[in-house]
Amino acid sequence: MNEEEKNEFEKAFEENKAAEKTAKEAEKKPPFGKRIASSLYDFVEMIGAITVVIILCFSFVVRLNVVDGPSMENTLHTGEYLVVSDLFYKPTQGDIVVLQSPEAAENYRKPLVKRVIATEGQTLDIDTETGKVTVDGVELDETYVNLPGAPSKMYGDHMTFESGHAVITVTEDHVFVMGDNRNNSADSRLSGIGLVDERCIVGKVLLRIFPFNKITAFSNPFDGK
């Protein structure tokens, strides 16, 4: 066999070997329909897993709450959706919370969104003429407050009145809450709500997720002060 014949033989051998390899790979590769079905199954399985995680999160970690009423304007408005969590939560002054107290007057037993103004052991003093709030002798810098018109005069007999001031010391495991729309809010100033047992706090408001153009993560205004 001369050199030219030898080269042609090797070339034909390599081509035949490559063809056999391609044929074997084609046999191993599943039909197009099966590949589509497999991909669809993987996609459905992934969606199912994500759905389970979301359900578990909203069952044990967070929940949704819808704002109902004007008491937290201009921070929150009716119809807005909030993400709330009570995971390892201990009420802190300045937090926005959702509460539902079976001990409240009948009109106030639905879920309420308010801000924690004072916690257990703290003494709160409200100037009934100006609406200024002092806790343990320190006047709060309440930049979030909406104060249209004259300060509210609605105070229950659970508070002590001293020279134009409404005063109360928060008892153990309770909080004093008020709405940011200070003159249009039913809150701890009323005897029908009063001090709120911490066990009645559904959770802390973490996020506003609807409307989408107002998505907000809420921070505590007193952090760092």
Image (cartoon, rainbow, N blue to C red):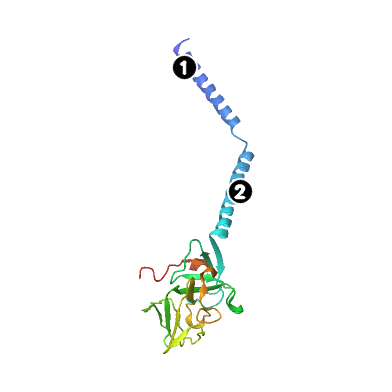
**Is any part of residue 76 visible from this angle?**
no
* Residue visible at 58% across and 57% down in the picture: 55
Q: Can you give x and y, in whole percent of width and height, for residue 72 in the image?
A: 50, 76
Task: Depth check: give the residue in front, 77 or 139.
Answer: 139
Disc 1 target residue: 7
Q: Element under label 1?
A: helix
Task: Depth check: give the residue in front, 175 or 81.
Answer: 175
Q: Can you give x and y, in whole percent of width and height, for residue 160 in the image?
A: 46, 85
User: In the rendering, which numbered label is found on residue 30?
Assistant: none
- The image quarter containing residue 202 is bottom right
Q: Residue type at mark 1?
A: Asn
Which residue is the extreme one toward the front? 172
Disc 2 target residue: 44
Task: Depth check: give the residue in front, 154 or 159.
Answer: 159
Q: Element under label 2?
A: helix
Q: Residue type at mark 2?
A: Val
Which residue is the extreme one toward the top? 1
Query: Label 2 crowding class (10 Å Cα cut-off): few <14, some 14-19, many 20+?
Result: few
Is tag 2's residue or tag 1's residue first in the polypeptide sequence?
1
* Residue visible at 49% across and 72% down in the picture: 174
Q: Can you give x and y, in whole percent of width and height, for residue 98 in the image?
A: 53, 70
